[in-house]
Amino acid sequence: MPSGKIPPPPAAPRKPQTFENHGDARVDDYYWLREKESAEVIAYLEAENAYTKAMMWPSEGFQRALYKEMLARIKETDMGVPAREGEYWYYSRTQKGKQYSIYCRKHGSLEAKESVILDLNVLAKGKKYLGLGALDVSPDAKLLAFSTDYTGFREYTLRVKDLASGKVLPIEVEKARSIAWCADSATLFYVTEDEAKRAHRVWRHKLGSEEHTLVFEENDVRFSVGVDLSRSRGYVFITSHSATTSEVRFVPADRPLDVPELLVPRRQDHEYYADHHGEHFFIVTNDRGRNFRLVRAPIGDAREARWEELVPHRDDAMLEGVDLFARHYVLHERRGGFPKLVVVRFADGERHEIEFPEPVYSAYGGSNPEFDTDTLRFGYESFVTPDSVYDYDMNARSRKLMKQVEVLGGYDAARYRSALTHAKAADGTEIPVSMVWREDKRPKGPAPMLLSGYGAYGYPESVTFNSSRLSLLDRGVVFALAHVRGGGEMGKRWHDEGRMMQKKNSFTDFVACAEQVIAEKITAADRLVIEGGSAGGLLMGAVTNLRPDLFRAVVSEVPFVDVMNTMLDDTLPLTTGEYEEWGNPNEPEAYAYMKSYSPYDNLEAKDYPLMLVETSLNDSQVMYWEPAKYVAKLRTLKTDFNPLLLRTNMDAGHAGASGRYDYLKEIAFTYAFILGAVGITR
């Protein structure tokens, strides 16, 4: 604010509602904030935004400076690495001043004339938000199936574009999810979602007809369904999956009218996923252990009795997936917390592992649409190495750097250091903590630190490069990732030990990581800022309730903090499908355990750190009212004078702003809060 006093924080009216489950009564004073269409709710959110803006007003110049320096590192007009599919080379590019990517192709060679197949900037004209879902060219390269969302609620509408004429065909499917083309380039399989945003129905449609035929419906509310076309283009797979169980059906891509055939019937806790090569289905399965093994089975008789093991289950290696090519297959493994790529030749079974130069890194499959090739495209990056695309000759074992993201402004990787340390959890488990800093800017004593965590769904916290993060490192901040249980860094065991009735391990692991970096004098409690989003926001809420004295400030992004109300409401997106991640609170034991850590239900009258809570009005995964209720309740309980800020993006969803420039402005705002919390204001 240019002048005058900062207004007092908003006070949301209390409107108590009582909920009783298993003989336990919960009084919720702010349940009314769920009423999204209410003028009173919108007014409250806008009042919180105004208060946050006022509190952050002294940093507005700093925010602008951060935005400019982050933007200055980005090559605004740039192009991705083209990938060949059939007779065309496909790529995306960005153009200075434009928020979104432009998708293009060239016929025959990279010297040919460019053809724009989809310009998101044109689609976004006059819109405050644009999200792209599907983007899939038909096998004959004449049609483009694509889906878009204009609210952030991840509610996509499917359309098909004729790439010769540029016209969009008269097909429009709402609430569409995954898609798969059939061999005739005229028939599409697609998935639609129900009112709770569960992908549950698979449809078949032939372009030019009025008929949309239901070919499969998933009736178990724990399961979602998806479709995909194998790289061989031989089969369309229909996969139903819950958090612990899956089931696969298949349809020959050249016989789309066939009834989908079941591969192996589902049984609880058996996960398996299928792909196609020649006369076999290749199946990644956890039937012999949680970390999966690889088998193959004849297409005509894929019963489990016919499964031939290719890669056994191993306790020290998680098999995350397999890429099949005509003459090779590539295993995506995770060992020691980091990804590994192993190439196997079909002809003789010869295998080798692709070597990576750094101890702390990420590696992943790139764009590999072609089946008949001996070249694997993969991505590689680390805390200090920008995102790099390689083409790897699987026979010669040689790699070629196709592109490394250019960081403008004289970035020198040699100035930065990364390291790995470990914290000991309460049960003796060693929890990895990966870190990066700028060597010549790190102070001799405890440094300011941003410690991030997630720890859910078996998703690993990947070590990635982020040019915006340099704005922290160049000011002496150490950035760290706490690889807590609940994630997937150490395979399925790591996930299992941080979910359901062991969920609290995620929280105590994070506290142990914070205590470790303080004990090593890398940072200090008054210099430690923590952050996490979505399920990582649950982590932030839980650890802040546990040890508010351990952190200077907390950033919670779209945080899942109202665990009980959300998981007891089976009409909400994700709820029933996540009973196998958090537990089913309709069961008394699970209810009591979940309530014992739910951040909203465990707020107390005590001192809390500085807090910035960020959300989006149209979030479909963590509804805006969770963080709004959390802040409203915390304001009535906290006994300190530390700022508590709620910022709601009124035009976005779970991932925040969709435009790249708008997104950078959001990061600049958050970084200004983080840096200001540790006394850095320029």
Image (cartoon, rainbow, N blue to C red):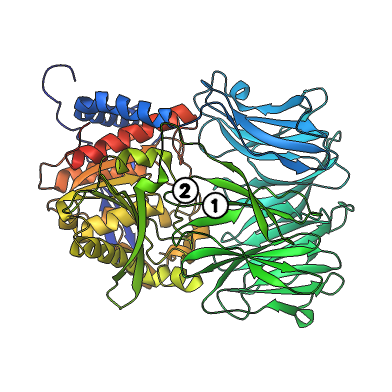
Q: Which mark is residue 385?
A: 2
Give the total of numbered labels: 2
Q: Quadrant of the C terminus?
A: top left
Q: Which mark is residue 380?
A: 1
Report the side of 526 relative to 417 (left or right). left
The alpha-carbon separation of the residues under discs 2 and 1 comes to: 8 Å
Residue type highlighted by circle 1:
Tyr
- Measured as percent of width and height from the top left, residue 255 is found at 89, 53
Report the side of 645 relative to 260 (left or right). left
Residue at point 82%, 69% (across, down): 280
Can residue 395 be seen here?
yes
Whether residue 98 is situated above or below residue 481 in the rendered picture: above
Whether residue 234 is situated above or below residue 497 in the rendered picture: above
Contact (Cβ within 8 Å) of mark 2 with mark 1: yes
- Measured as percent of width and height from the top left, residue 609 is found at 18, 48
Residue type highlighted by circle 2:
Thr
Q: Residues within 10 Å of mark 1 (few under 14, many from 20)?
A: many
Whether residue 33 is situated above or below residue 53 in the rendered picture: below
- Measured as percent of width and height from the top left, residue 507 is found at 31, 63
Secondary-structure class at tag 2: loop
- Measured as percent of width and height from the top left, residue 339 is found at 53, 63
Report the side of 161 relative to 675 (left or right). right
Secondary-structure class at tag 1: strand
Q: Which mark is residue 533?
A: none
Residue at point 35%, 60% (across, down): 419
Can residue 628 be seen here?
no
